[in-house]
Amino acid sequence: MLCQCSIGSDWEEKGLHIEAWQRLISFAVGPIKGLAFPFIPESERPYSDIEWEILSARGGVPFDRLRLAGLAPDLPEPLRAEVIDWTASMAGVLGD
């Protein structure tokens, strides 16, 4: 998966262009696209199912940090503790 994670409030207009990366990386298998949100997209406004289909087709699989954080209990120690410590240290940067 090739993931676009430097997105801001203009995320709907951004896309991930795998073709540009293929000039730099020789992928053995073509990657799928993804978007990693540092926020919950629906906190800005509600999106219809059709809008999500269009956005996903353009940007790829959507990930938000709350859904990813839900996987934390399954992480092995000490990785889980390291992730929690790092996240706590980045709270001021990542926002509320």
Image (spheres, rainbow, N blue to C red):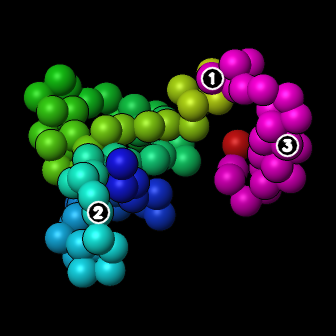
**Image-based side of 67 in relation to 34, left or right:** right
Q: Amino acid at mark 3?
A: Glu
Q: Is the stretch drawn in magenta largely helix, strand or loop?
A: helix
**Residue 9 appears in view:** no
Of the numbered discs 3 and 2, the one sitting upstream in the chain is 2
**Residue at screen point 17% across, 23% down:** 49
**Residue, disc 3:** 82
Residue with the mark numbered 1: 71
Q: Is residue 78 left or right of residue 57?
A: right
9 sits to left or right of 57: right
Residue range corresponding to the magenta coloring: 71-95
Q: Quadrant of residue 93?
A: bottom right
**Which residue occupies 74% across, 18% down?**
73
What's under tag 1, amino acid-wise? Leu
Q: Nearer the viewer, mark 3 or mark 2?
A: 2
Vertical arrangement, residue 36 with respect to residue 11, above or below = above
Q: Is label 3 in a helix, a strand or a loop?
A: helix
